[in-house]
Image (cartoon, helix red, strand yellow):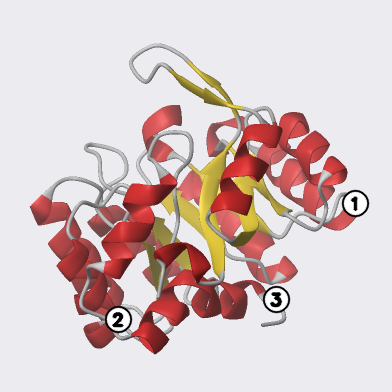
Amino acid sequence: MDIKTYRKIDAHAHIGNFGGWAGVSITAEELIAQMDEYHIEKTLLCAEPNEGCLEAVEKYPDRFVGMVYVNPLEGQAAVDKVYHYVQEKGFKGIKANPLKHAYVADTELMDPIMEAAKELNIPVFIHCGHPPYSLPWSIALLAERHPDVKVVMIHMGHGHGVYIDASLKMARRYPNLYLEMSGMPMPSKIREAYETVGADRIMFGTDSPYHPAAVEAMKVATSGLTKEQMQDVFYNNCAKLMGFEK
């Protein structure tokens, strides 16, 4: 089967212009075109500021699912932002990036945001894989402190073998930890996650515009999973986590 024909949900993507070291950009329309090419039915979308994400979600409500981008260093304003975008604008989850905003993932400043996530029954997606702020051990400590909140480790350790291994180990230890595989270079770890963490706790993402959808999809295709298992990673697992109909 052509890898493009699998139904997919992209569990992590951005829109915007990301200059500096990255030098990449993508518009909502360009992301929609990529989704159409790779049979990505929905994308969990984030942007900072959140109004950029909201504009895209309102323009393409059947394709984009809003994720509230929060910075816990903003204190109560960050919590208020969560309630505003979820309760008033229909966003379905939270995106946190300790690396970007320079805080350790398990800081107590995250606790009010995690409590909001629990009350609203939404998952928290956290960038995972870069020291000193976004290491899997710190994310695991946060998940341990909030066992009723589902926490997704975006990139599951990213490009560092030790952090990838730690992401798997932490996810095996804490049942509320999930894994998203964009930017993680080892296809074999997708299969290992499926078999040892949980068949429903590893999901596909592109991290667009930072990584090509073709590369991210091919990692799943070369992971050693069966067609049925790949469909779990590509679509079913994210649909289950987010409460989408299959």
Answer few, some or many: residues within 10 Å of disc 3's Cα (few below 14, many 20 plus, some between 14 and 19): few
Q: Which residue sits furthest top?
A: 20
According to the picture, the residue beneath numbered tag 2 turns out to be 194
- Residue 176 showing in the rendered view: no
Front residue (pair 209, 197)? 209
Answer few, some or many: residues within 10 Å of disc 1's Cα (few below 14, many 20 plus, some between 14 and 19): few
Residue type, numbered disc 2: Tyr
Q: Secondary structure at mark 3?
A: loop
Q: Residue at x 25, y 52 (%)?
A: 184
Q: Secondary structure at mark 2?
A: helix
Front residue (pair 143, 11)? 11
Q: Quadrant of residue 116?
A: bottom right
Q: Position of residue 115 (x, y in %)?
A: 63, 62
Q: Marks 1 and 2, how far apart in space?
A: 35 Å
Residue 206 drawn above or below residue 114: above
Mark 2 vs 3, N-terminal side: 2
Q: Which mark is residue 244?
A: 3
Tag 3–tag 1 contact (CB < 8 Å): no
Front residue (pair 9, 100)? 9
Q: In the image, is 120 to the left or to the right of 127?
A: right
Q: Where, quadrant-wise, is the N terminus in this rendering?
A: bottom left
Q: Position of residue 135 (x, y in %)?
A: 25, 49
Q: Which residue sits furthest front?
A: 1
